[in-house]
Image (cartoon, grey):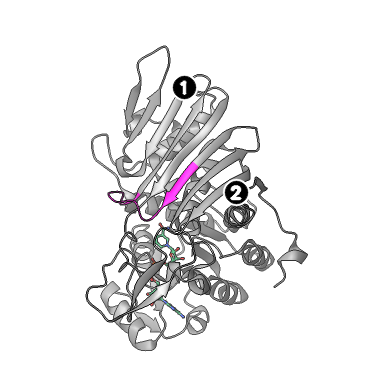
Amino acid sequence: MKRLGMGLVGPGFVGAHHIDAVRRLGFVDVVAVAASSAASARRKADALGVPKAYGSFEELVADPDIDVVHNTTPNYLHVPVILAALARGKHVISDKPLATTAADARLLLDAANKAGVVHAVTFNYRGNPLVQQAREMIAAGELGPVHFIHGAYLQDWLLETTDFSWRLEPEKGGASSAVGDIGSHWCDLVQHVTGRRIVEVLADLTTVIDTRLKPAASSEAFARSGDAARESVRIHSEDLATVLLRFDDGAKGSVSVGQVCAGHKNGLWFEVNGRQASIRWEQERQNELWIGRRNAANAVLAKDPSLLAPGARGYAHLPGGHQEGWADAFCNVMRDVYGVIAAGARPGAPHPPAFATFEDGYHSACVVDAILESHRQGAAWTRVGALTAAEAVR
Ligand SMILES: NC(=O)c1ccc[n+]([C@@H]2O[C@H](COP(=O)([O-])OP(=O)(O)OC[C@H]3O[C@@H](n4cnc5c(N)ncnc54)[C@H](O)[C@@H]3O)[C@@H](O)[C@H]2O)c1
């Protein structure tokens, strides 16, 4: 198999996991990282065992040894980094959210299609074997007609006034904080699993902590920033959200999203109720899938490749009883995306399920925009729009 060169822009919290995941594929060479300065890029490259370090993303995308550019920068840099990579004809794997507005996401989708390269967004929970099992079961009609899709994505790492992230600054994270950051994962996941699209939303957003003490030096996500000097800043974006959902086939739903919920570390869960059965998957117990029935005993399917549907089996790499985790699911996403790149497939060609494209990233941005708009309108039902290419021009 031809080896592929990978370069990563933004070697922070999640960037290290992109590097770890592609290394496990066996045919990808991690060529370079780019950070905000030459010195920090060199430091990160040395820590991650990466040969080349660049002080700007423009230099990285120009490197002829790089076939695939990974974007793991703070959200406000996604547009310039991705456009620069596409202009050089590189395949692009961007972390979520693809962009901070639907208009920007549309711009990136159109640019990627025009460049004719492979484009992907790391909605990494798709890579969990039992997520794929849930998807197979729903597609096979095992739940019967689905009427309710609900759940939550709760964390607590922004609970204290001294907790801070660029995600809370609209000019860096976007107008939405919790919804754009983690609500986007939940919405993509349930749409992926159920095969249904969110078409209308009614949202109530809250900023529980409206003043925070921002450290003078920035810190990575989930990191406590210690006793650094701080300034008091007003926060305008939401850290808590409740959203009612309507799906395209008439199914109803709801989701709670918050990053100020004590005890919840990465508490993503969803439940799907059909006329014959229910299923529930919890990220923090990701090796179990709950199956609920009315006229038979409920069951918990423990992840075991020999018990999974054929389409889900390939996402489990260890035998039953051997737990798989977040990083394994992340690697599954990379395996799906790099498999398509290695096969020389073009965008639009069929692709494996854990592979979310810029089209998915764009739809996700439309959902986030609709949630913000619903809240602005005083919690009014709001359609998830789709911008035309002309509307997307900045
Ligand atoms: N898929 C997931 O589960 C997941 C998890 C965390 C973050 N993310 C996403 O990944 C992205 C990064 O988040 P993070 O938590 O890793 O943030 P982070 O702050 O830990 O890392 C961002 C990195 O980008 C670097 N950077 C800043 N400006 C730069 C520039 N001009 N050029 C190059 N690099 C620059 C920073 O120095 C830092 O190393 C965000 O879009 C976030 O939404 C996704």
Q: Earlier in the sequence, mark 2 or mark 1?
A: 1
Considering the whole magenta stretch, tell me its main secondary structure.
Answer: loop
Q: In the depicted view, which residue is nearer to us: 186 or 9?
A: 186
Q: Quadrant of residue 214?
A: bottom left
Give the position of the N terminus as an image quadrant: bottom left
Q: In the depicted view, which residue is nearer to us: 91 or 391?
A: 391
Confirm or deny contact between disc 2 and disc 1 (CB under 8 A): no
Q: Position of residue 338 (x, y in %)?
A: 48, 57
Q: In the depicted view, which residue is nearer to us: 296 or 52?
A: 296
Q: Secondary structure at mark 2?
A: loop
**What amino acid does circle 1 point to?**
Ala
* Badge number at residue 277: 1
Structural distance between the alpha carbons of marks 2 and 1: 32 Å
Q: Is residue 17 magenta?
A: no
Question: Which mark's residue is nearer the viewer, 2 or 1?
Answer: 2
Badge 2 crowding class, 10 Å Cα cut-off, few under 14, some 14 to 19, many 20 or more, is some
Image point 53% across, 20% down: which residue? 275
Residue 193 versus residue 153 in the image, above or below: above
* Badge number at residue 379: 2
Q: Position of residue 56 (x, y in %)?
A: 46, 84
Where does the magenta region start and end? 255-266
Q: Is residue 44 left or right of residue 119?
A: left
Residue 202 versus residue 74 in the image, above or below: above
Image point 43% across, 39% down: which residue? 131
Q: Is residue 257 magenta?
A: yes
**What amino acid does circle 2 point to?**
Ala
Q: In the depicted view, which residue is nearer to us: 342 or 131?
A: 131
Image point 27% across, 82% down: which residue? 229
Tell which quarter ligand 1 is in: bottom left
Badge 1 crowding class, 10 Å Cα cut-off, few under 14, some 14 to 19, many 20 or more, is many
Q: Position of residue 303 (x, y in %)?
A: 32, 34
Residue 314 versus residue 358 in the image, above or below: above
